Amino acid sequence: MSDQPSPEHDSAPSFTVDTAKVLAEVAHNRQKDKLKRPYREHVIAVGDALADFDDDIRIAGYLHDIAEDTPITRQALLDMGVSQRAVSIIERVTNRLHDDPDDYQAGIRFIAEDHDATLVKIADNAHNSLPERVKALAEKWPDKPPVTKYRDARPVLYSAVDVEEVRKILARVNPWLLQELDDRLDEEDDVDYENLSYDDAGPETRQDS
């Protein structure tokens, strides 16, 4: 008799990206956002925006609000087979688990200390900042629309990861923010290209004659 395990016992990921997507749809099924729209549309869009990244990050994207807005606990996620890494990302982006949940910008800085959590939050921020949504929120809260905090958070989040990672996310979920990103990069680039001389250029920019 062979001592080899049977195929049905072969190790395999017990919780997949597709599983996360289904769980997100079910867990948020009856919830509405600030504009009274189905909240599941938001969490699915965030997960979809992270399609260029690894499975743990994508799973955390779909489940990024599950600890915030549902009774599902950390242990329940682990028992389902969600990886420790994905759970840690979810916990870091969960506002109610921060030291001061009322200090949004402090929470953003805390998230920005972790590369993976930052990617998830950039996707979350980008979907919340879609032009049509920004307009609707501004009309509903004309004195101080909620989108103001999203705008203020972007420089902190963007500076914590590679710019090409930011571009990949924005291209999928909110291409309108790409121009804002390019404008910000232009502002941060303080080189005076019009008056740049050969001697000013670094060795990496010079051509051998």
Image (tube, grey):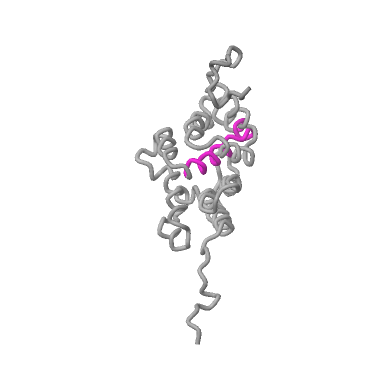
Q: x, y percentage for residue 113?
A: 41, 39
Q: In terms of depth relative to the viewer, which is nearer, 171 or 42?
A: 171
Counting every numbered tag in the picture gives: 0
Is 14 magenta? The answer is no
Q: Is residue 193 left or right of residue 91?
A: right
Q: x, y percentage for residue 13?
A: 52, 63
Seen as rendered, the residue at the extreme front is: 209
Seen as rendered, the residue at the extreme left is: 99
* Residue drawn at 45 percent across, 44 percent down: 93
Is 120 magenta? The answer is yes
Question: Is 97 above or below relative to 146?
Answer: below
Q: x, y percentage for residue 141?
A: 54, 29
* Residue drawn at 43 percent across, 60 percent down: 78
Seen as rendered, the residue at the extreme bottom is: 1
Q: Quadrant of residue 127?
A: top right
Q: Is residue 94 left or right of residue 99?
A: right
Residue 38 visible (yes or no): no
* Residue drawn at 53 percent across, 39 percent down: 122
Q: In terms of depth relative to the viewer, which is nearer, 72 or 59?
A: 59
Quadrant including the C terminus: top right
Question: Is 78 above or below relative to 57?
Answer: below
Residue 162 visible (yes or no): yes
What is the magenta range? 117-136
Seen as rendered, the residue at the extreme top is: 195
* Residue drawn at 42 percent across, 50 percent down: 88
Magenta stretch secondary structure, dominant = helix
